[in-house]
Amino acid sequence: MRSELSTLHAGFRDAVHGSQAVFRTVMRAMSVPALPVNLPTNLAPPAPLIATAAAILITLADFETAIWLDAHLASSDAVCQFASFHTGARLVRDPREAHFALASTPQSMPCLATLSQGTPEYPDRSTTLIVQVAGFAAAGLAFTGPGIKTVRQFSFSGMPKGFAQQLRDNHAQFPQGVDIVLAASAHIAALPRSARLVRER
């Protein structure tokens, strides 16, 4: 046990204030869909997990939740140990069982329809999908909805084929559906289920 702990990557230096700051940033990103928000963090998680995604995960997940990791992340004992130790959450193999699903790249993200959609009575029980991305652009897809004054254009690096249709199908279930948080090196952006895709290029 001592040798395992000696190799464990540290979490927040100040757990309370660190998680509070990240939570506020995630809520800010959710309130302004498709708009990158700065998320500074001093975390140094094990690769291929990046600091922003790690900060979101250990802030939102806890012992009452379940986490799904894509194959690349799940193959790293250090990543699994980091996620389990700092959240207390269960790691599951079926993404449909996960409260939080984490993809190391856009190409490895599960189809939104394969994740928990919540129920009419409890739409908040759906999966939150966290995806690591290389960066964002203010072009490509156009969104409207709460938190967007008119129309906001947005895209991210490596956006998978067919993703636009997945977003349309996801929004059509509102208030059920999956919320997405995209994590780049120093910024995050959210595509909550309330955001409606109106145009793609």
Image (cartoon, grey):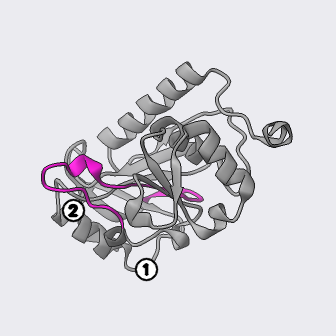
Q: Which residue is mark 2?
A: 171
Residue 44, relative to residue 22: is it above or below?
below
Magenta stretch: includes residue 123: yes
Q: Residue at x 52, y 28 (%)?
A: 19
Q: Residue at x 82, y 42 (%)?
A: 7
Give x and y (percent) for residue 125.
Answer: 28, 50
Task: Judge by depth and name the residue closer to the eye, 36 or 78.
Answer: 78
Secondary structure of the residue carrying numbered label 1:
loop
Mark 1 vs mark 2: in front: 2
Give x and y (percent) for residue 58.
Answer: 55, 39
Which of pointers 1 and 2 lies earlier in the amino acid sequence?
1
Q: Is residue 51 visible?
A: no
Task: Specify the farthest residue to the left.
Answer: 120
Disc 1 marks which amino acid?
Answer: Lys
Per the rendering, the mark at residue 11 is none
| Cα distance in 3D space between marks 1 and 2 | 18 Å
Local crowd at mark 2 within 10 Å, few (<14), some, or many (≥20)? many
Secondary structure of the residue carrying numbered label 2:
helix
Q: Quadrant of residue 85?
A: top right
Task: Judge by depth and name the residue closer to the eye, 158 or 119.
Answer: 119
Disc 2 marks which amino acid?
Answer: His
Query: From the image, which quarter does the N terminus lie in?
Result: top right
Query: From the image, which quarter does the C terminus lie in?
Result: bottom left
Task: Judge by depth and name the residue closer to the eye, 201 or 110.
Answer: 110
Query: In the visual, does 93 lie left or right of 45?
Result: left
> Bounds of the magenta span?
115-138
Q: Residue at x 49, y 46 (%)?
A: 188
The mark tally for this picture is 2
Q: Which residue is mark 1?
A: 161
